[in-house]
Image (spheres, rainbow, N blue to C red):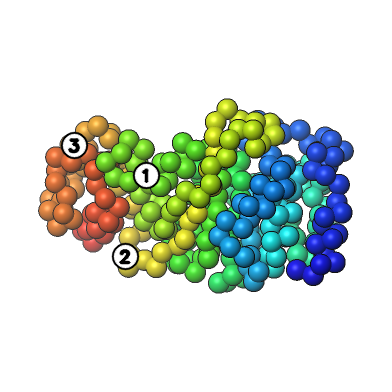
Amino acid sequence: MNDVYKNAIAALPPLRDVIQAQGLTATKALGQNFLLDLNLTTSIARLNGDLSGLDVIEVGPGPGGLTRALLMADADHVHAVEYDARAVEALQPLVQASAGRLFVHEGDALDIDLLAFGREGCRSVIANLPYNVATPLLIQLLKGIHARGSEAAKFMLLMFQKEVADRIVASPHSKTYGRLSVMAQWLCQTKSMKTLPPSAFTPPPKIHSAVVRFIPKARMDTVPFATMERLLAQAFGQRRKMLRSCLKEYAPLFEAAGIEGTLRAEDVTVQQYITLAGLIEAAS
């Protein structure tokens, strides 16, 4: 980015002044916890390296702390999706300072095809997701990756409550391994990149948060998204039961999938679920 634009962004009022001027108090109903430390937002923006050449999609920018960092990290364009009209208004000076690099889209991210923003092959998603809709937003993004393939996004850096992040990256045979683990790891390489204490946010939540990196995989299977969702819901919905009980209608397919009927849902690998889902689809 040209230094002129960086200087214009750096000259903007401090985020706390923006919040006060716009009456942008964080709202629990909207899952808002703002990141105001620009050193911290800068480190998050750069967790996967340089952003030059990339179009970044951000969800829930609030007063724009992470948004400023994304622009300063040389993102070509930033598409920020914001539900709160107060925040949309608060972001307008940043839109002007960005010289055409920041686009603010007002609306509910759950109703928007987020991966339609930006240029094919140049997209990334970096966001401090609103806590109250973080999991459904992740499922929506994974569905978009499933539909578009591995080129849907170069990578995603998404912030969650730490307990949700732990579930996303969990391995089989652990209590945190579940539907979200399998769905995410089916379509992406996942890695927990950074943990943040409550004090990093305004207002501070009661729990720690963590940033997870997702890198879409080149898939070899043709399993429909809905088929995998149904299988995992059924398996983990009764996770203490053996698979021969909670998935008894699929028992004839277990051997071909390399699955023992005496296993529980948490003991089945991602690849075994992919294989079983493929066999279910083929038999339907």
Q: Which mark is residue 92?
A: none
Residue 23 in picture, x, y percent from top left: 82, 35
Please identify the quarter of the rendering in which residue 123 is found: bottom right
- Report whether 197 appears left or right of 95: left
- Report whether 51 appears left or right of 64: left
Which amino acid is tagged 2? Answer: Asp
Residue 226 in picture, x, y percent from top left: 38, 52
Mark 3 residue element? loop
Q: Say whether disc 1 or disc 2 marks the residue closer to the N-terminus.
A: 1
Question: Mark 3 highlights which residue?
Answer: 242
Badge 2 density bin: few <14, some 14–19, many ≥20, Cα 10 Å: few
Please identify the quarter of the rendering in which residue 279 is found: bottom left
Q: Say whether disc 2 or disc 3 marks the residue closer to the N-terminus.
A: 2
Q: Nearer the viewer, residue 114 or 182?
A: 182
C-alpha separation, residue under disc 2 versus residue under disc 3: 26 Å
The reply to whether callout 1 and callout 3 are in contact (CB within 8 Å) is no
- Report whether 132 appears left or right of 283: right
Q: Nearer the viewer, residue 248 or 54?
A: 54
Residue at the spot x=49%, y=69% of the render?
Answer: 151
Which amino acid is tagged 1? Answer: Ala
Residue 56 in picture, x, y percent from top left: 64, 61
Badge 3 density bin: few <14, some 14–19, many ≥20, Cα 10 Å: some
Q: Say whether disc 1 or disc 3 marks the residue closer to the N-terminus.
A: 1
Q: Is residue 115 positioned above or below 171 on the image?
A: below
Q: Which mark is residue 170?
A: 1
C-alpha separation, residue under disc 1 versus residue under disc 3: 20 Å
Residue at the spot x=24%, y=54% of the render?
Answer: 272
- Report whether 225 appears left or right of 14: left
Residue 82 in view in this figure: no
Q: Which mark is residue 221?
A: 2
Q: Nearer the viewer, residue 47 or 63?
A: 47
Which amino acid is tagged 3? Answer: Met
